[in-house]
Image (cartoon, coloured by chain):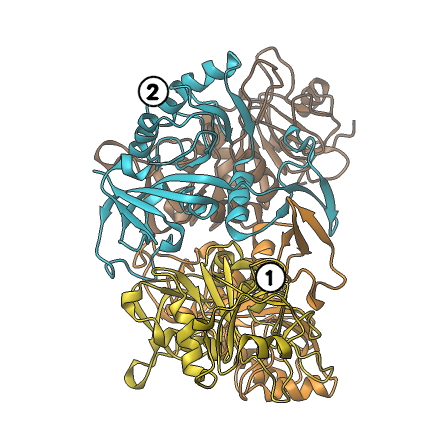
Chain colours: A brown, B yellow, C cyan, D orange
Amino acid sequence: MSVTSVPALQHTDRGPLSRDEMAQALARDIPRGAYVNLGIGQPTTVADHLPPESGVIFHTENGMLGMGPAATGDAIDPDLINAGKLPVTELPGASYFHHADSFAMMRGGHLDLCVLGAYQVSAAGDLANWHTGDPEAIPAVGGAMDLAVGAKQVFVLMSLFTKSGESKLVEACTYPITALHCVDRVYTDVATFDLTTGEAVGVRETWGISFDELSARLDVPLTWAGS
Amino acid sequence: MSVTSVPALQHTDRGPLSRDEMAQALARDIPRGAYVNLGIGQPTTVADHLPPESGVIFHTENGMLGMGPAATGDAIDPDLINAGKLPVTELPGASYFHHADSFAMMRGGHLDLCVLGAYQVSAAGDLANWHTGDPEAIPAVGGAMDLAVGAKQVFVLMSLFTKSGESKLVEACTYPITALHCVDRVYTDVATFDLTTGEAVGVRETWGISFDELSARLDVPLTWAGS
Amino acid sequence: MTQLCASVDDAVAGIADGSTVLVGGFGITGMPFALIDALIRQGAQDLTVVSNNAGNGDTGLAALLAAGRVRKVVCSFPRQTDSWVFDELYRSGRIELEVAPQGSLAERMRAAGAGIGGLYTPTGVGTLLAEGKETREIGGREYVLELPIAADVALIAAHAADPLGNLVYRKTARNFAPVMATAATTTIVQVAHVVEVGDLDPEAVVTPGIYVDRIVQVAA
Amino acid sequence: MTQLCASVDDAVAGIADGSTVLVGGFGITGMPFALIDALIRQGAQDLTVVSNNAGNGDTGLAALLAAGRVRKVVCSFPRQTDSWVFDELYRSGRIELEVAPQGSLAERMRAAGAGIGGLYTPTGVGTLLAEGKETREIGGREYVLELPIAADVALIAAHAADPLGNLVYRKTARNFAPVMATAATTTIVQVAHVVEVGDLDPEAVVTPGIYVDRIVQVAA
């Protein structure tokens, strides 16, 4: 697999990123003033690294633009929740709309970016994040498919390896697909990937692992990206 | 043609209805509290016979429920017009919405009734009211097709005969169609018709003409309705 | 014409066995608890419920499920930390489930309300949820045909209503309610406040009264 | 991000020849006169204009037509007592016309904004306006397939905006503007009032700022 070595982006002098550092790494790549949906779960922590000065405006699928941070104490309002059904706050300039309007916004390509978790992402950008394929599991999709097909860019935030050490960045997803050819970038604890570079998956930066070690562990061809 | 004579509804002791009497005759048949769209032109005069006590709520296609009477003098507001682009007023309890929402309301079957003018109506309820078929004419449809397919009931208000004496209630429309099988009733200067009675067109009432004279002048089979 | 009901029991009167019932709410936010409790008392059975989730905890939609009144749930996200009532019914084969992408769920109800016979959406293409559905390429992109979800009854909650049935909501409790109101033959609304005709700003009415059949005031 | 422009000329900068331009308004109510005048000065040619009507009198859209900048008009109702500019261009074969039912016009723009590839509507079935269009029976009713109308630019008018681009309208001047705002790559809005962020009630915002690219204040 071809290697264009860019050592400055290969941080082998430290370990993998913490979850907070992963969120921070992703947040750094969000353009000023972007309209962003952070899905549910870990991706929502990206907001902690995007203060109001960033101009980033958060959308939540359940009908709001201009969502603020989590609500605590007296600020908790049962009528004001995010997609994960946790209490949040309203920022000045917010707006509310119903579900058909909210999903029209998502599906119509108006959000600049969404951040999603994943079970697997394929080199071609296929996303699997809604169903383990376990026949015992109760299927539940929520807005995942809508976000994946609709946002202008889809960033995935996930650990690169499963607990048993298998890569979640794969040649072809074995889990049921959420959407085809939708993921633009993957932010993990050991590397960030760009899936829009062409034949090979672009590696933008590594932590605690070298490009060569990473190449050896993945079944997908890698190249340095953004150089 | 079969005749069930109901002389009480056959007003041969007087002439045809005036335009105002036609509007009044139609207004009498509008249920209390109905949501009604009066299109443009002559049908809008029906509103003059439906005071606020009727509970009737008027929809205008350009995005409003709760439309009031024509605006005059200082009450004229260029931002408040009806489908005919004439200044109107707002009644308490009104609401505004955009065009997609307004036509969703129309097409989704939520209006109880619309009243439209017509060039021709067929015995089967086909409506022709948007195009004369003249190849020189500039086609213009507006909301006519949407209203015709969408309203729960479609009442047509028109003179029965053309200036040259031909009936506008026909076996089959020769003018381009607005919508098929949509008209429920036709209110004219000389008779009101019910098109929902089955094989023959139902005559509900006549003015200045007897049922037999009417039958002789029309090419469609007639019967007394509502008896 | 909108009817102002004296009680929630009046409001849900006449809902027939076998009805398709749209139930508002995203989780418990916007859920019409009082109407659901009344529906349980009313007794209609063999219902198909369309809602974003499949009940939370032991109240509201979960209580309707627990009472054995629901044959089938159509929703986007049944699986939650507190969906034990549904989970148990599902795993024991006592309830049917149709999972739909949340946006398709909303758009299919909008279609029913807007007189649209079907629509093509890119959501779901190539997934399990498009299996058995017609797909089609339009302008170089692949789409799935989704059909309307029309219902007999919608049970929703709103913040305030006037006697004409005009509704406003509060924050994200709005969610599915305005869409559901358009898709049901009979739309029944529990509201925290009933105000006078003319008290709602005509520019800010979210659900015009034409979509609302019955309203009942319930303590917020 | 929404850009607050210093002038209407800045607001319409960069509109390319051959663009499809959505023009708000129902007759002259809600028509963005100042933006249209700026577009005439800007000089873009060979435009396809989508609007409910085809111009009234000699100003606004009629002036754009009179200036010879429009190749084709897509509208529901060109023929009006004061549409002499369009009438003359049409009769002399200098402008193309596509007539669409008003509801289909609105719904096709909504579809473009909502990522819908096509939709089935009963409007137009059996008429001249469905000629050449696919029809299909769904659930016993006949429908026509209508495709989205997406545009390069929308020119609309609103009552007030905040600097984030959130918009509110006034009475029936709202008409097509909120739908058009969703269907264009670049949405340009003339507003009578620019207010502070936070001054608009979040429950009453009609067009969220995400749909708005440029705003310019113009005397009401």
Q: Nearer the viewer, residue A176 or B209?
A: B209
Residue B42: give its label. none
Q: Position of residue A182 (x, y in %)?
A: 65, 38
Three-letter code for the amino acid on which mark 1 is drawn: Ser
**Drawn side of residue C16 relative to residue D14, left or right:** left
**Residue C202 or A38: which is nearer the viewer?**
C202
Q: Is residue C212 above or below residue C10?
A: below
Are there few (<14), some (14-19), or many (20+) residues within 10 Å of tag 1?
Answer: many
Q: Residue D67, located in which quarter of the rendered image?
A: bottom right
Residue C58 - label: 2
Rate crowding at label 2 as few (under 14), some (14 to 19) or many (20 or more) other CA atoms within 10 Å: some
Same subunit under labels 2 and 1? no
Q: Which residue is mark 1?
A: D104
The amino acid at mark 2 is: Asp
> Looking at the rendering, which quadrant does residue C42 occupy?
top left
Does C26 appear above or below D215? above
Q: Position of residue A172 (x, y in %)?
A: 72, 25
Element under label 2? Answer: loop
| Residue C83 horizontal side relative to residue A137, left or right | left
Judging from the image, what secondary structure is the residue with disc 1 in? helix
Task: Say whether residue C150 is left or right of residue D72.
Answer: left
**Front residue of B18 and A138:** B18
- Residue C89 placement (x, y as % from top left): 47, 15
Estimate the x, y position of residue A39 in percent, counting from the top left: 48, 35
Q: Chain of mark 2?
A: C
At 75% from the left and 39% from the top, the residue drawn is A198
Q: Quadrant of the C terminus of chain D?
A: bottom left
